[in-house]
Image (cartoon, helix red, strand yellow):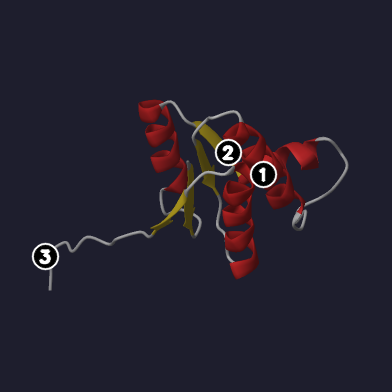
């Protein structure tokens, strides 16, 4: 199964993905980590463009084909990125599910 965690920066995607991966024994793929490694390699500078996502799709499909559950975590701002994650799952012959993370502001009760 592919679980895609999406949302804007600071919404808790990484925290939730790490906790869920540990609980269910899944592989956690974080596009930010892939992009940081590409920059550290000296092959590119931020923003790296679509390369981090493309590497993530390939890694996800490889792990899914091995029978592993994958939690892919990134902003996923475009329909093309969301479609590409689904295509990775279809290519591996597994289902996928999507979760959007949003920060919820708590009321302090003060007027």
Q: Quick check: 14 left or right of 39?
A: left
The residue located at (22%, 60%) in the rendering is: 106
Seen from the viewer's position, the closer of residues 5 and 62 is: 62
Mark 1 vs 3, N-terminal side: 1
- Name the spot of residue 58 as percent of width and height, x first: 70, 42
Q: Residues within 10 Å of mark 1 (few under 14, many from 20)?
A: many
Quadrant in the rendering for residue 20: top left
Seen from the viewer's position, the closer of residues 79 and 104 is: 79
Quadrant in the rendering for residue 38: top right
Residue 74 shows which numbered tag? Answer: none
Mark 1 vs 2, N-terminal side: 2
Tell me if label 1 and label 2 are in contact, CB under 8 Å: yes
- Name the spot of residue 79 as percent of width and height, x first: 59, 69
The residue located at (64%, 41%) in the rendering is: 61
Residue 56 shows which numbered tag? Answer: 1
Q: Quick check: 54 left or right of 108?
A: right
């Amino acid at each position: 199964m592919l679980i895609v965690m999406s949302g804007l920066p600071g919404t808790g995607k990484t925290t939730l993905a790490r906790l869920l991966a540990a609980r269910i024994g899944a592989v956690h793929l974080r596009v930010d980590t892939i992009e940081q490694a590409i920059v550290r390699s000296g092959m590119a500078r931020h923003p790296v463009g679509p390369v981090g996502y493309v590497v993530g799709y390939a890694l996800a499909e490889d792990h899914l084909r091995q029978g592993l559950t994958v939690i892919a975590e990134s902003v996923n701002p475009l329909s093309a990125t969301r479609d590409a994650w689904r295509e990775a799952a279809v290519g591996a012959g597994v289902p996928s599910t999507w979760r959007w993370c949003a920060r919820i502001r708590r009321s302090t009760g003060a007027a």
